[in-house]
Amino acid sequence: MATLQKRALILFAHGARDPRWAEPFKRLQEIVQSQSPELTVALAFLELMSPRLPELVPELVASGVGDVTVVPVFLGQGGHVMRDLPLIIAELKAAHPAVSFKIAGAVGEDPQVLSAMATYCLGAID
Amino acid sequence: MATLQKRALILFAHGARDPRWAEPFKRLQEIVQSQSPELTVALAFLELMSPRLPELVPELVASGVGDVTVVPVFLGQGGHVMRDLPLIIAELKAAHPAVSFKIAGAVGEDPQVLSAMATYCLGAID
């Protein structure tokens, strides 16, 4: 069952109607993938963009992924992160009982991310 | 007219129904305010939370602010940043012609913010 041990890191974002919205998320995916080439780093969306999380995970599992970490690429933790995401993951766990799922905290909760945002905000006024 | 030269930095976020959602934005405001005590650093929302931007700006102007920089604390630049915010600012400019308004790029477009998010995402899988 060694093929089931492949690991995936899913960057989970909200999605939007405007395709330009996804650009920083794609850049984030590229940066993370380049820094960790042994991982499968994928982008998935809650709504309005593809792939949705329930579409992506079966593809990853079919490719041999047995360990999935989902990072909510959200600044605030509201209903989408606290309620919608756990429900989606619960359904995915039921459908893929051999796969390990973990949900990380939202990126906006990270002190280093906040610090980088603060530096950017202060720079904007110069 | 020296009192009109007070400067404000407005951190503009989406808003959400869950009050916990606003916590990182409040922390961001506190960090930025502590790093730049001479500025008025305020938080404003597009919807669902108070104050909205059109509510906040008249208060700032009444307090002597004559120069406003708005930083969209959004990761992606979709309709809210590209369309809604410029419309709100255009109305505020019309209502406050003596006040200077500037809109910065969204925080998610900043390479250092992306880099900090990438580091966080990679750390989530350990």
Image (spheres, coloured by chain):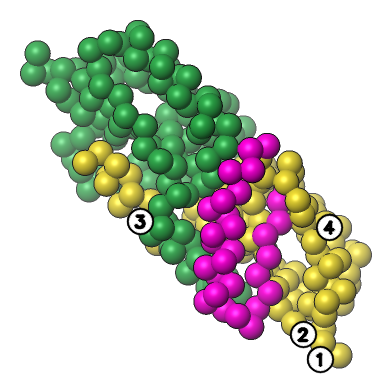
Chain colours: A green, B yellow
Would residue A126 be counted in the magenta stretch?
no
> Is the Cβ of the residue at disc 1 closer than 8 Å to that at disc 2?
yes
Q: Which amino acid type is shown beneath numbered disc 4? A: Glu
Which mark is drawn over residue B55?
4
Q: Chain of mark 4?
A: B
Q: Which residue is mark 1?
A: B2
Amino acid at the residue labelled 3: Ser
Residue at 51% over, 32% down: A82
As helix, strand or loop, the secondary structure at mark 4 comes to helix
Few, some or many residues within 10 Å of mark 3 (<14, 14–19, 20+):
some
- Describe the element under mark 3 as helix, strand or loop: helix
Assign a secondary structure to mark 2.
Answer: helix
Quickly name the residue at label 3. B115
- Range drawn in magenta: B17-46
The image shows residue B68, relative to residue B25, as above or below, that is below
Instruction: Compare marks 4 and 3 and give the one earlier in the sequence.
Output: 4
What label does residue B5 carry, if any? 2
**Residue B124 x, y percent position in the rendering:** 29, 42
Q: Nearer the viewer, mark 2 or mark 4?
A: 4
Disc 2: host chain? B
User: CA gap, disc 2 to disc 4?
Assistant: 20 Å
Q: Tell how many labels.
A: 4
Horizontally, is B66 left or right of A39 in the view? right
Report how far apart the C-alphas of labels 1 and 4 lie in the structure.
24 Å
* B28 in the magenta segment: yes
Earlier residue among tags 3 and 1: 1
Image coords of residue A96 (percent x, y): 30, 11
Q: Label 1: chain?
A: B
Residue B51 in which image quadrant: bottom right
